[in-house]
Image: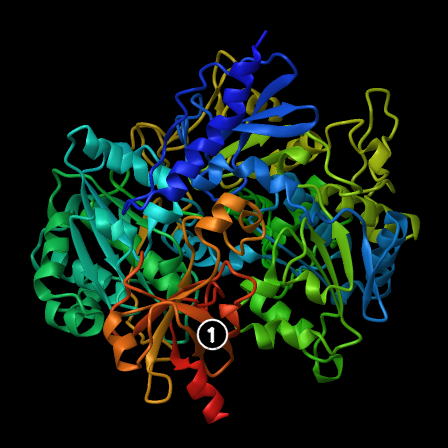
């Protein structure tokens, strides 16, 4: 039995560790293993179980301690390969996200402008009736916080049941350009490498991102190697100095959009100097560009000679003019990539993705690695990092995007629709061939009057907060308020900026209050079980989808019946009797997650994203796909895709095989894109560049982390970072509240001069976690033409003293 002192220690370990990190003023966040917890034995009422962390896409595992039906302790999971017992400051506090004082516990319907409690049966019937009356004007907006079964259920409900493709996730706002970059280069999505590259590389290049704060556990793999005496060179390319810069050997400050010419310039020098990897390119690569007729995902083939002609203009001098980095620094980067004796890992996140040239710059950085041959060996990898726990597993793999189907399929291809219909056992023709609206278009249609063509009238939002995260909020969200014919349904855990305009609020279970499966940034699929009950009448999002579907089934809606006339989500017991999982009292009579996951597994083999059976994930701390069964019955994961030494699908005898090549010849594509300036640049009226992003203490919109008192005390408010000289010129003092304005809106914020992040003159930075200071009233909704991902990183703004603003008005 565990003695009381031991139990008390376990309960307090995480809090003490996290508090010490929050209080630290060190230039880098500290992460370390929880040395006080070894084998985590059950005993004396305390039980432990594994789960991936609820926050970012790193996929750290935690051990969750439960006592008397509550989560009372969190420890880093030493058995997990991702984090090896480490957690960041948010991870140590993750258990507390369940226990905010303002949890939503009853369905709420807005009547005469006021939210009124109703029963679940009425709530489900309201939703079902609106869908039944106009299924084609209904939309679902989800996120990379959906579990795989949640996203799969929503996907099947919409595309297999309703024949409606208006389903999109908030990952459209963060990962869509990474998706199109991978597809355009390799013909299949997701990184070829894995986190092991960080343990093997000689050089890490961060392209416009800040992993020291955004992915601190991963970043610690690099800094830990240095602490052991290893020589790992870090080059930070960014538009402002960050905590990552503090650890860098070299900081290269670029202009907004400077990453595009930098990548082009590196390739130009590799070609000009003849020190690219000629053998790798000749054997494994083609060249590609957009046709004259316009931009497209797969473009058209060009010759190497044509590639050379087009890239010739991106001389070091021209790149210096476009990007702001010096000729010497560009040559230094090119010399690194020209060296075959070192291993280079590139990392990026939102800086390259939230970009009107997002698809272009993603493919260009892949191209730098391919052209130089720094690919496919441990430590040589171009790697995109994700911000949400299942943006990969649920959005990209399950395909919860307006144009996609599970397993890498798309609605536009007849054979993909037919396969999906067969797996779902629905009637032929059930899946609509026309892609639905992507996120920006979806909300534009929802906030536009029906009389003006706004043909989305009912929207169901699950596990995300678009009232805070959408760009240009006044246009894409706030304009919904006066529209009486538009109906917003929000499944949520806490009141948010989105619930403020909701017509119906459904209280949701969260994290270990339900079963779940996530997929992280390195293709790792991770499972957990429900450990505690949700408060009040909060319920699982998957259950909500199934309950709405069954109500439509009861109403006689044909799409909710499969080819055999049975409910499309029917689950039967061993005797063949249907389990009424649409009744919440019966939902946990079986493992609905397992049923949905096993059905989804059928989809995964087409693009070689093979998954193991559900029970294998129960036993593991996640497995990186493709996962294949061995002769002895065990299941083997894959660390390095397309590399013959590790990938089971590479043709025998081949060193590399890009087996989903868009050119159908086993080759990857090296792209050329012409540089384009940002769509909005500073001018006399709005003279500052505005960039938005995140901070270490808070996750995304702060819905969870701002309810954790230690984190909220450490970072209690949004702010605007300014350069000291810009502040001095405007007579603005440290901490003074100012107005940040653009052509779209304004936001009041206190000024932070020379703080954690340090923008150059003419630039400001604002984090978006604070719902009382909505910087997305200010941001731009221009987006990449291919990925449809908006650019939150650059628009024209100004900073105005409040007194001056009042005089002006």
The single residue placed furthest to the right in the displayed view is 555
Query: Badge 1: how crowded within 10 Å, few (<14), some, or many (20+)?
Result: many
Residue positioned 58% across, 45% down in the render: 398
Observer able to see residue 418: yes
The quarter of the picture where the N terminus appears is top right
465 relative position to 63: left or right: right
Query: Compared to 710, does 65 lie above or below?
Result: above
Q: Is residue 507 above or below residue 502?
A: above
Task: Say which of 701 and 541 sits in front.
Answer: 701
Answer left or right for 471 relative to 478: left
Q: Secondary structure at mark 1?
A: loop
> Residue drawn at (48%, 33%), measured in percent from left and top?
15
Provide residue 713's location: percent of width, then percent of height.
Answer: 48, 50
Report whether 108 appears left or right of 375: right
Label 1: which residue? 780
Query: In the figure, residue 219 lies in which quadrant?
Result: top left
């Amino acid at each position: 039995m565990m003695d009381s002192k031991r139990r008390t220690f376990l309960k307090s370990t995480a809090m003490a560790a996290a508090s010490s990190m929050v209080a630290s003023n060190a230039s880098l966040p500290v992460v370390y293993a929880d040395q006080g917890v070894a084998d985590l034995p059950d005993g004396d009422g305390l039980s432990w179980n594994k789960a991936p962390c609820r926050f970012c896409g790193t996929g750290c595992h935690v051990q969750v301690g439960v006592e008397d039906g509550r989560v009372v302790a969190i420890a880093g999971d030493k058995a997990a390969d991702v984090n090896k017992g480490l957690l960041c400051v948010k991870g140590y506090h993750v258990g507390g996200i369940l226990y905010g004082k303002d949890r939503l516990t009853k369905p709420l319907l807005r009547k005469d402008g006021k939210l009124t409690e109703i029963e679940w049966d009425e709530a489900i019937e309201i939703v079902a009736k609106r869908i039944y009356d106009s299924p084609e004007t209904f939309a679902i907006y989800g996120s990379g916080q959906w579990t795989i079964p949640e996203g799969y259920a929503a996907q099947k409900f919409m595309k297999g049941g309703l024949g409606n493709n208006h389903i999109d996730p908030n990952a459209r706002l963060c990962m869509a350009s990474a998706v199109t970059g991978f597809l355009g280069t390799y013909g299949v999505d997701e990184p070829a490498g894995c986190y092991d590259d960080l343990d093997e590389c000689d050089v890490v290049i961060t392209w416009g991102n800040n992993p020291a704060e955004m992915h601190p556990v991963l970043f610690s793999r690099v800094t830990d190697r240095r602490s052991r005496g290893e020589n790992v060179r870090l080059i930070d390319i960014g538009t402002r100095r960050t905590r990552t810069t503090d650890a860098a050997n070299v900081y290269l400050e670029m202009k907004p959009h400077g990453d595009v010419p930098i990548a082009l310039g590196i390739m130009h020098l590799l070609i000009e100097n003849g020190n690219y990897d000629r053998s790798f390119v000749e054997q494994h690569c083609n060249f590609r560009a957009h046709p004259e007729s316009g931009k497209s995902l797969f473009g058209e083939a060009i010759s190497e000679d044509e590639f050379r002609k087009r890239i010739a203009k991106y001389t070091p001098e021209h790149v210096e003019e476009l990007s702001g980095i010096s000729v010497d620094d560009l040559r230094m980067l090119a010399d690194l990539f020209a060296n075959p004796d070192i291993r280079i890992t590139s990392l990026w996140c939102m800086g390259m993705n939230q970009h009107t040239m997002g698809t272009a710059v993603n493919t260009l950085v892949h191209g730098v690695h391919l052209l130089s041959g720094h690919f496919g060996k441990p430590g040589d990898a171009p790697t995109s990092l994700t911000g949400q726990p299942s943006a990969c597993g649920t959005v990209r793999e399950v395909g919860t995007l307006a144009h996609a189907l599970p397993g890498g399929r798309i609605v536009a291809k007849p054979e993909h629709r037919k396969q999906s219909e067969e797996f779902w056992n629905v009637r032929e023709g059930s899946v609509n061939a026309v892609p639905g609206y992507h996120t920006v278009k979806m909300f534009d249609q929802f906030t536009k009057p029906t009389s003006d063509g706004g043909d989305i009238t009912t929207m169901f939002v699950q596990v995300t907060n678009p009232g805070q995260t959408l760009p240009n909020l006044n246009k894409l969200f706030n304009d919904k308020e006066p529209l009486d014919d538009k109906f917003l349904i929000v499944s949520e855990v806490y009141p948010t900026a989105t619930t403020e305009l909701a017509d119906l609020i459904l209280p949701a279970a969260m994290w270990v209050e339900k079963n779940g499966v996530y997929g992280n940034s390195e293709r790792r699929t991770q499972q957990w079980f429900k450990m505690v009950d949700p408060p009040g009448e909060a319920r699982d999002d998957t259950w909500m989808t199934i309950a709405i579907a069954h109500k439509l089934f009861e109403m006689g809606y044909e799409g909710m019946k499969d080819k055999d006339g049975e409910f499309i989500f029917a689950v039967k017991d061993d005797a063949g009797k249907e389990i009424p999982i649409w009744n919440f009292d019966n939902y946990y009579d079986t493992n609905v997650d397992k049923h949905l996951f096993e059905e989804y597994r059928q989809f995964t083999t087409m693009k070689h994203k093979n998954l193991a059976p559900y029970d294998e994930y129960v036993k593991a701390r996640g497995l990186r796909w493709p996962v294949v069964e061995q002769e002895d019955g065990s299941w083997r994961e894959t660390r390095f895709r397309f590399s013959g030494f590790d990938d089971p699908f590479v043709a025998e005898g081949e060193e590399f095989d890009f087996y989903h090549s868009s050119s159908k010849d086993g080759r990857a594509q090296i792209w050329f894109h012409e540089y384009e300036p940002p769509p909005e640049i500073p001018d006399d009226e709005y003279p500052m560049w505005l960039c938005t992003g995140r901070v270490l203490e808070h996750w995304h919109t702060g819905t969870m982390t701002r309810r954790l008192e230690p984190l909220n005390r450490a970072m209690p408010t949004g702010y605007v970072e300014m350069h000291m000289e810009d502040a001095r010129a405007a007579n603005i003092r440290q901490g003074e509240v100012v107005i940040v304005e653009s052509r779209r809106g304004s936001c009041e914020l206190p000024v932070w001069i020379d703080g954690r992040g340090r923008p150059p003159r003419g630039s400001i930075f604002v984090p978006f976690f604070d719902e009382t200071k909505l910087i997305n009233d200010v941001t731009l909704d221009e987006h990449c033409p291919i990925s449809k991902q908006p650019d939150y990183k650059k628009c024209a703004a100004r900073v105005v003293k409040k007194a001056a603003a009042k005089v002006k008005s």
